[in-house]
Image (cartoon, rainbow, N blue to C red):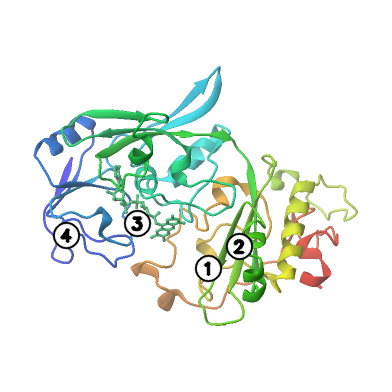
């Protein structure tokens, strides 16, 4: 276990991810076992659990001891019923971005993710963190059990159906240190993400429900710089199943545009439907990758352009290996430049290749006359 006692700049516990908050905790400890955690708790309070420091406010702070949870043993155990995987038991300090690829390897998935994968499971669940989507729940909604160590050092497991379960899941960290959670899982699936530019506010507000139901997950980003249009509309559409790696299907030479390639109609339909709906909003398919903050390079963002990919590489807006450009280290003012153009033409969703390997279908969003001419 490591203990940090002093830091001239921000106190022993440092700052939150965004850098807007200096934790006031007297001490930061990082136990590496449940026994070490119990020993810290036995010293008395006040204490508070710390996840990945992504809360913008002082929710995770204390004037006593902050307990970092990322040093505790990592666990990912699949739970089965009648031989079928139904849930996964994970350590609380694990980040979604570290959990998701492991699930994918096992052919499993979660039903939703937040905008970034850098957050810890326990910290995100404790605060009711959510992704987007009319039909999918918050990250807490798939929790079937919470295991926590209370102030007295007792290891308590509270399961779905227990009287206090709801309050124990979205607990704001008030009940103890969550060391493990059980999460519902399902077979893996793919998601295609398409970004549209400049949807009109009047059309959005005319029927907001129609907009939020455009896809499995829908986000509207705006800087309010234009009173008439929002900056971007991001539509993530869940495919009915996991689609084979498009690169594995890609022939080396030119593609027969009449349709020799395997076509996933679900992809075509989903993206085309979203494009048609977005057109009613006055929006156009983005001609290159977008960052939610206009003008910021989109390298940190998950793949767009209607190209289907694994759930955990599309549901978050940001990729684990990059830091989203909103923290102190990479503010738009330092990394701001014009949006990166597509290295090639937008992808054709029917052939799932980029032009000129294009299906030229009028149902294919990037190929349709209204979007690509
Ligand atoms: C760039 C950015 C994007 C975001 N996107 C979204 C989004 O898309 N949707 C959304 O809903 N929110 C979003 N958030 C908010 C974020 O999901 C929450 O702040 C979440 O709590 C962060 O988790 P964390 O692990 O960093 O928790 P911390 O900030 O470290 O802690 C948050 C709370 O959880 C408690 N806690 C942490 N770990 C434990 C544990 N093991 N046991 C008990 N309590 C614990 C802490 O005591 C504290 O009360 C975003 C934040 C940032 C900075």
The residue at 67%/72% (across/down) is 203
Ligand 1 under 8 Å from disc 2 Cβ = no
Label at residue 292: 1
Q: Specify the farthest residue to the top.
A: 82
Q: How many marks?
A: 4
Label pair 2/1, CB-CB below 8 angstroms: yes
Secondary structure at badge 1 equals: loop
What is the CA distance from the residue labelled 2 to the residue labelled 1? 9 Å
Q: Tell me the residue that label 2 is attached to.
A: 234
Give residue 54's mark. 3
Task: Point out residue 260 in the picture as x, y percentages from the top left corner.
Answer: 87, 47
> Quick one: SS at disc 3?
loop
| Sequence-first disc among 1 and 3 | 3
Discs 3, 2 touching: Cβ within 8 Å? no
Label 2 sits on a secondary structure element that is strand
- Circle 3 packing at 10 Å, graded few (<14), some (14-19), many (20+), is some
Q: Which mark is residue 24?
A: 4
């Amino acid at each position: 276990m490591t203990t940090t006692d002093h830091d001239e700049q921000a106190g022993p516990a440092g700052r939150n991810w965004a850098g807007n908050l200096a934790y006031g905790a007297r001490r930061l400890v990082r136990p590496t076992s449940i026994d070490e955690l119990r020993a810290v708790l036995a010293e008395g309070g006040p204490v508070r659990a710390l996840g990945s420091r992504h809360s913008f406010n002082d929710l995770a702070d204390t004037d006593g001891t902050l307990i970092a949870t990322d040093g505790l043993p990592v666990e990912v155990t699949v739970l089965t019923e009648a031989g079928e995987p139904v849930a996964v038991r994970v350590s609380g300090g694990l980040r979604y971005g570290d959990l998701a690829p492991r699930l994918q390897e096992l052919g499993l998935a979660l039903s939703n993710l937040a905008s970034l994968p850098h957050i810890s499971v326990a910290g995100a669940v404790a605060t009711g963190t959510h992704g987007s989507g009319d039909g999918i729940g918050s990250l807490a909604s798939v929790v079937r059990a919470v295991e926590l160590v209370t102030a007295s050092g007792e290891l308590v497991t509270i399961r779905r159906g227990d009287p206090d379960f709801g309050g124990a899941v979205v607990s704001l960290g008030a009940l103890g240190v969550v060391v493990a959670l059980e999460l519902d899982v399902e077979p893996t699936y793919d998601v295609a993400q398409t970004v549209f530019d400049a949807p009109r506010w009047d059309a959005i507000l005319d029927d907001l429900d129609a907009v939020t139901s455009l896809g499995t997950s829908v986000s509207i980003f705006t800087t309010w710089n234009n009173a008439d249009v929002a900056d971007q509309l991001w539509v993530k559409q869940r495919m009915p199943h996991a689609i084979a790696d498009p690169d594995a299907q890609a022939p080396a030479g030119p593609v027969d545009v009449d349709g020799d390639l395997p076509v996933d109609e679900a992809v075509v339909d989903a993206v085309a439907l979203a494009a048609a709906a977005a057109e009613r909003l006055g929006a156009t398919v983005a001609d290159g990758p977008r960052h939610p903050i206009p003008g910021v390079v989109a390298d940190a963002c998950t793949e767009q352009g209607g190209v289907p990919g694994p759930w955990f590489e599309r549901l978050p807006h940001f990729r684990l290996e990059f830091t989203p450009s909103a923290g102190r280290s990479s503010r738009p003012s330092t990394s701001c430049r014009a949006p990166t153009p597509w290295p090639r033409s937008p992808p054709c969703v029917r052939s799932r290749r980029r032009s000129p390997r294009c299906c030229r279908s009028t149902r294919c969003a990037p190929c349709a006359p209204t979007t690509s001419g």
